[in-house]
Image (cartoon, grey):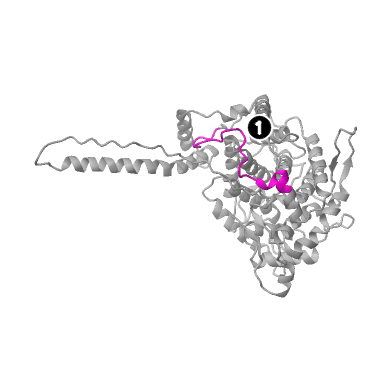
Amino acid sequence: MIPNEYEALRALMARHGLMSLFRRASPRQRIARVVAGLRAERGSGENKHARLQVVRLSAPLGAVMVPILGVLLLSLLAKARPDPVHVGIIEMVEEEVPLPLDPTIVLTLDPIRPPEPLPLDAMLDADVVTEPPEPVKTKVLESPVELVDLFSAAPARSPMAFSGVLENRDAGKRAAAMLKFKAPGITEGAVLRALRWLKEEQLPDGSWAKTKPAMTGLALLTFLAHGETPASEEFGETVMRAIQWLVENQEANGMFKGRDGHNYSHPIATYALCEAFALTRVPMVQEAAERALAIVIEGQHASGGWDYNCKQSMRDDTSYMGWCVQALKAAKEGGLHHPDLRRAMSQAVEGFRKNAHPQGGFGYTSPGQGGLTGVGVACMQLLGAAKEPEARRGLAYLAQEATFSWREPWGGSPMYYWYYATQAHFFAGGSAWSQWNARFPQELVRAQTILRGASPNEPDMGYWDSPGTHEHSDGRVQDTCLSTLQLEVYYRYLRTLRPPDESDEVERLATGPDVIRVEVVI
């Protein structure tokens, strides 16, 4: 970052009061907060946070204390041993090298996946809100969450750290990826028009309507997918305000204000915060993301699935599970911490198996077929289970049944179905991707409503409205985000999922049990 850009970014952050986010609490304040958290009610947000910090601190403390105890023991043994020749005083001095309590992780991250459309059974019912839609405006330092990273060894040297993070999203590598995966030349223009429309639709407080946590998470993911960060020239302030809104509107227990009745908002917002932390490395974003992540992991069923509101039940909802899995994957790729993160990702595969149909496909809360098949296939690919029979049969089902036509949309919620189907085909590669890629981008770009600039110097904007007659949507913002995320699929996942160049998955599924070549890094 050149000096002028750095100064501009610094001024922008100062104007929004964000420079205070990098002030670190004193050791006394950090210890006091952990002690208070350990005394708090078990299961509360503060108690969970304190226990997590103790776990993270135990290893470095042990590394320091064990050598000290060894030196003391040797000193005692030396004093107890008589010397017949002379009496001398032996003084042993060992210089202690302080160890970082929690070393900074240099990410080799792949963006996680785009948020998925709100669930099929009115996942974001704007009429059912558990919190007031207009959250109380407070400054970051007045948030109920103390926005400090208590035991972080070393924050990033500057507010933004991009080295090695989501590197496929810069302009040059985006272009290379689009060429490699045969993106039509019309897609990037449509993406930029949509990003400019979303920028105009952002509310003064930094959020998007209607269900603010979910829509703000979706919109933020759409900007991040294009490589936009708080340092970006055109969209930087939009991204910064969205991140700030999510952090400020998180409650002390990790939930978000203004959530919908089934709380699809939570995994969507968690997903967005995890990816935002991967790009910014800001400690306050890490803490907010880890608080939200804990709710997702602790809400997982023994069967591996999830239900509304991350509650414990016997109901495994494929639609809700899709958001939770993307949040877990984002946390893993972003270097966030939870002791059960890997276990939760492994166990989630079983939740999808439970809803898989023996002839191919995935149902809503039981074995079935239909539009939710894309959710099951894409999530199993994300979890490293692309070779499993359920994922293979689901991919074959999509090849036979899934269509992309704006005039004859697939099912009642086509935006939702297409979003996952596009990812599943991209991850599969081969003819599965070639055939899907020959249809979907042209249909999407042709269906975009374009708002022409008022003058030659004013750029065009664009948005989408779902063609589905029964689409469970939160409105135009959701439809535009889901469409844009599909057009960004060419460069979003290269670091995490590397689709093979020469495989032909659909033909192999039809002719034999060959292994599907989808490489997934978990």
Mark 1 neighbour class, 10 Å CA radius: few under 14, some 14 to 19, many 20 or more: few
* Residue 399, position as x, y percentages in the image: 77, 65
Position of 299 with respect to 458 (left or right) is left
Quarter of the image for residue 418 reads bottom right
Residue 104 vertical position relative to residue 471 in the rendered view, above or below: above
> Which part of the image, by quadrant, shows the N terminus?
top right
What residue appears at the point 66 percent right and 64 percent down from the top-left corner?
517
* Residue 409, position as x, y percentages in the image: 85, 56
Position of 106 with respect to 267 (left or right) is left
Position of 290 with respect to 179 (left or right) is left
The amino acid on which the numbered mark 1 sits, given as a three-letter code, is Ile
* Residue 286, position as x, y percentages in the image: 58, 39
Closest to the observer: 51 or 39? 51
Residue behind mark 1: 2
**Looking at this rendering, what residue extends furthest in the left direction?**
84
Q: Is residue 339 visible?
A: yes
Q: Which residues are magenta?
A: 148-174
Q: Is residue 61 magenta?
A: no
Quarter of the image for residue 125 reads top right
Closest to the observer: 439 or 303? 439
